[in-house]
Image: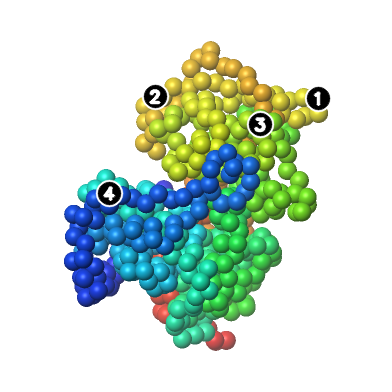
Amino acid sequence: MTEEKKGISPEQKARLKAEYDKDWRKELRKAIPAKERMKMPRQKMPEREPEERNRDFREVNLGLEAEAAMAEARRCLDCANPQCVTGCPVSIDIPSFAKLVEKGEFCEAVWKIKETNSLPAICGRVCPQEIQCEAVCTAKKAAGSPVAIGNLERFVADFERLSGKVTVPPLSPPTGRKVAVVGAGPAGLTAAGNLAKLGHQVTIFEALHIAGGVLVYGIPEFRLPKAILKAEVDYLQRLGIEIRTNFVVGKTATFEDLKKDGYEAFFIGSGAGLPNFMKIPGENLVGIFSANEYLTRVNLMRAYEFPDYDTPVFKAKCAAVIGGGNVAMDSVRTAKRLGAERAVIIYRRSRHEIPAREEEVKHAEEEGIEFHFLTTPIRYTGDDKGHVTAMECLRMELGEPDASGRRRPVPIKGSEFMTEVDLVVVAIGQSPNPLIPQSHPGLKMGKWGNVDVDWNTMATSLEGVYAGGDIIRGGATVILAMGDGRVAAAEIDKYLKNKKRPSWG
């Protein structure tokens, strides 16, 4: 499954140039020449001490102070052809918002971001800017380190919220057209927000009792506080979006049922909630969880606040997490905070190939997480009560690269060994949620269970039905899901404008 690369539109290029040519921007560029800006050091994000933070669920990163944010914004070279915008899946006008931060106009900066991204406080915390906008930042090429775009985005979003100056942007006149969005995760929230700004009547149908999708059940409090997520969702509801929770599309109602209620277009953002397992002996023992179940218990059901929240969770002596992605890092750091004496990552490739964000790996190492690279489990053993007590592992070595470009792990014969564990979390990825495809015949699927789409428009094989996020990608990043939602919203708007208004409209 491949995605065609999308650049910014000619219209956005024209808007970027108009912003770049403003007199106040020219004065800022004159005030500090580019050579001086390139000598400025990158501002470090303040963090809590590892020995303190690995015992609770309060946020690890503390956010920039105003002076540090302005100093970091001065590092932006205000390029005439900003590659950072192309590197952003939702095409934020990054130079403009950075220059507003440099001027100290923090609310104006976040309003600039919200022209294309309605969830800046979330993106500033969990998006992998280091492989997207910051990866192509001119300051990185010229001075060795990129502008800390994600940290600035987080700063201005938090400033707006804490200052009480959150405002709703001008909305287009009501169109009278109804759109149903399936799933209140990052893809669905983004699609809904953009459609609401365009004047459409949008309802999000969410299976869980709280909006947020993977943002609420998958990402721990110490990375994304629930209060931040709630504030972002509240902002979207102020745009006029209705969110109906405990509503399972495909069970509670189908698209055909919703059409009878006047919905003319649909966006599927139901995520990848089907966990993958290794299918090795003993995997059904008590104490072996999918990352989905483990993190959902802790994050959504707030097991970390037991008994205030009546969701017990097993506290291990030795917790082993299988995998090397961000979900694995979230799981192992959660186990450590819940009291595990040892919390271990088991990853079949080397440190160089690990796919998790560098910051997450660094934080895990600082917090006392053990890493066992080039290792894979091959079976689990348990006690007479059926609870896991140990796992047998195999040492690996790296062979030739596979389809992902990473070197394929190859077993080393005779390298088996046993290690004691009483909690195992399997975090090796997940598959797209199968419910909607199963309940909607004619929806074309890919070979991995993903909904098949036209990557230029996010249109599915069903007329008026679009999709984005993990349901089409498998497990991917929050910002890629948001990019899908943004593209789909624009295409749904075009579809509705070209579609004959129904007789009840």
Which one is in front in this view, the residue at disc 3 or the one at disc 1? 3
Marks 2 and 1, Cα distance to the nearest angstrom? 39 Å
Disc 2 secondary structure class:
strand
Label 3 belongs to which residue? 341
Mark 4: which amino acid? Answer: Lys
Label 1 belongs to which residue? 384
Marks 2 and 4, Cα distance to the nearest angstrom? 32 Å
From the viewer's side, name the closer residue of 446 and 418.
418
Most distant residue in the front direction: 67
Instruction: Classify 10 Å Cα crowding around label 2: few (below 14), some (14-19), many (20 and above).
Output: few
From the viewer's side, name the closer residue of 73 and 345.
73
- In the picture, which quadrant includes the C terminus? bottom right
Earlier-in-chain disc, 3 versus 4: 4
Marks 3 and 4, Cα distance to the nearest angstrom? 40 Å
Label 2 belongs to which residue? 399
Earlier-in-chain disc, 2 versus 1: 1
Disc 4 secondary structure class:
helix
Disc 3 secondary structure class:
loop
Label 4 belongs to which residue? 140
Mark 1: which amino acid? Answer: Asp
Marks 2 and 3, Cα distance to the nearest angstrom? 34 Å
From the viewer's side, name the closer residue of 452 and 184.
184
Which one is in front in this view, the residue at disc 2 or the one at disc 4? 4
Mark 3: which amino acid? Answer: Glu
Residue 332 in the figure: left or right of residue 401: right
Marks 3 and 1, Cα distance to the nearest angstrom? 23 Å
